[in-house]
Image (tube, rainbow, N blue to C red):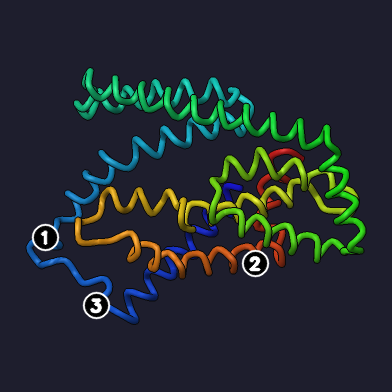
């Protein structure tokens, strides 16, 4: 989903630029004393802040994509590289390291318990015949591949409002995946649609982790309701991106075909 991810980010950027042009009061220019920075200083700042982090991200993802390392090994390399960067920026302190370890342990425990709960739910659900019931119900609706994809994506879109993306994947995806063969849907293409659709979980209230991230760095007078309202156009952009991916599957399938042909 790397190319669809960049595609979606590009649509975000285009929207912000167009909005800034049409409504300049939404994005006022910096004061001259703040915005008049020599180009050489900008390049140095960019190199110091952006380039090392980008190289770290590309090395971690590249190691996974090209089969050099497993996700666990690549994560270890990423953690080690992040520690080196923190040391280079002189921000590697015992307090920061302790907080990082604590937050990592807490997040890992949360995800692990989520998997335990979802596995328990899926096992009981399958034992009671729930997956067979849903499969027969869906097949009994006489859907074609288009209507099945539309229905599944609408369900995932709605689930993104109250649930996190991890919960949707581990609980609901095992229900949809066995149905793909019956409708002749490519599992990779379905996964790309879901990956793009799951971005709604970051933007849609009441969970909307992106909203809380923004609230944490925004001025005190900015409220969560204002942030939620500002996110609505981006949710519309996500719907457009999903439609374009469906109409032009090469957006998502080109890179896997090149890497794994």
- In this picture, is 64 found above or below 15? above
Q: Residues within 10 Å of mark 2 (few under 14, many from 20)?
A: few
What secondary structure is marked by label 2?
helix
Of pointers 3 and 1, the one earlier in the residue sequence: 3
Residue at 11% across, 60% down: 34
Residue at 48% across, 61% down: 10
Q: In terms of depth relative to the viewer, which is nearer, 152 or 240?
A: 152
The residue tagged 2 is 244
What secondary structure is marked by label 3?
helix
Q: Position of residue 168 (x, y in %)?
A: 63, 45
- Image quarter (top left, top right, bottom left or bottom right) of the C terminus: top right
Label number found at residue 34:
1
Verify CB contact (< 8 Å) between mark 3 and mark 1: no
Verify CB contact (< 8 Å) between mark 2 and mark 3: no
Verify CB contact (< 8 Å) between mark 2 and mark 1: no
Residue at 57% across, 32% down: 114
C-alpha distance separating marks 2 and 1: 40 Å
Label number found at residue 25:
3
Q: In terms of depth relative to the viewer, which is nearer, 124 or 187?
A: 124
Residue at 83% across, 32% down: 127
Write down the quadrant of residue 117 in the picture: top right
Q: Residues within 10 Å of mark 3 (few under 14, many from 20)?
A: few
Q: In screen coordinates, is 189 left or right of 251? A: right
C-alpha distance separating marks 2 and 3: 31 Å
Q: Position of residue 182 (x, y in %)?
A: 90, 51
């Amino acid at each position: 989903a790397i190319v669809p991810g960049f595609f979606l980010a590009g649509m975000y950027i285009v929207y912000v630029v167009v909005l800034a042009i049409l409504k300049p009061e939404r994005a006022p220019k910096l004061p001259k004393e703040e915005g008049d920075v020599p180009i050489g200083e900008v390049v140095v700042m960019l190199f110091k802040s952006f380039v090392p982090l980008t190289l770290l991200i590309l090395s971690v993802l590249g190691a996974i994509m090209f089969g050099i390392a497993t996700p666990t090994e690549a994560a270890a390399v990423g953690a080690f590289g992040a520690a080196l960067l923190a040391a280079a920026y002189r921000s590697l302190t015992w307090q920061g390291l302790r907080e990082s370890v604590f937050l990592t342990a807490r997040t890992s425990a949360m995800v692990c318990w989520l998997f335990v709960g979802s596995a328990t739910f899926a096992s009981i659900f399958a034992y009671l015949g729930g997956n067979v019931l849903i499969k027969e119900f869906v097949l009994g609706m006489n859907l074609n591949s288009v209507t099945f994809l539309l229905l599944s994506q609408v369900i995932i879109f709605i689930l993104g409002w109250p649930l996190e993306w991890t919960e949707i994947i581990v609980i609901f995806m095992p229900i949809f995946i066995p149905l793909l063969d019956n409708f002749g849907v490519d599992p990779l293409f379905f996964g790309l649609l879901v990956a793009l659709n799951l971005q709604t979980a970051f933007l849609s209230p009441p969970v909307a982790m992106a909203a809380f991230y923004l609230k944490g760095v925004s001025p005190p007078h900015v409220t969560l309701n204002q942030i939620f309202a500002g996110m609505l156009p981006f949710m519309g952009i996500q719907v457009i991106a999903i439609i374009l991916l469906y109409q032009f599957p090469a957006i998502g399938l080109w890179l896997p075909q090149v890497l794994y042909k």
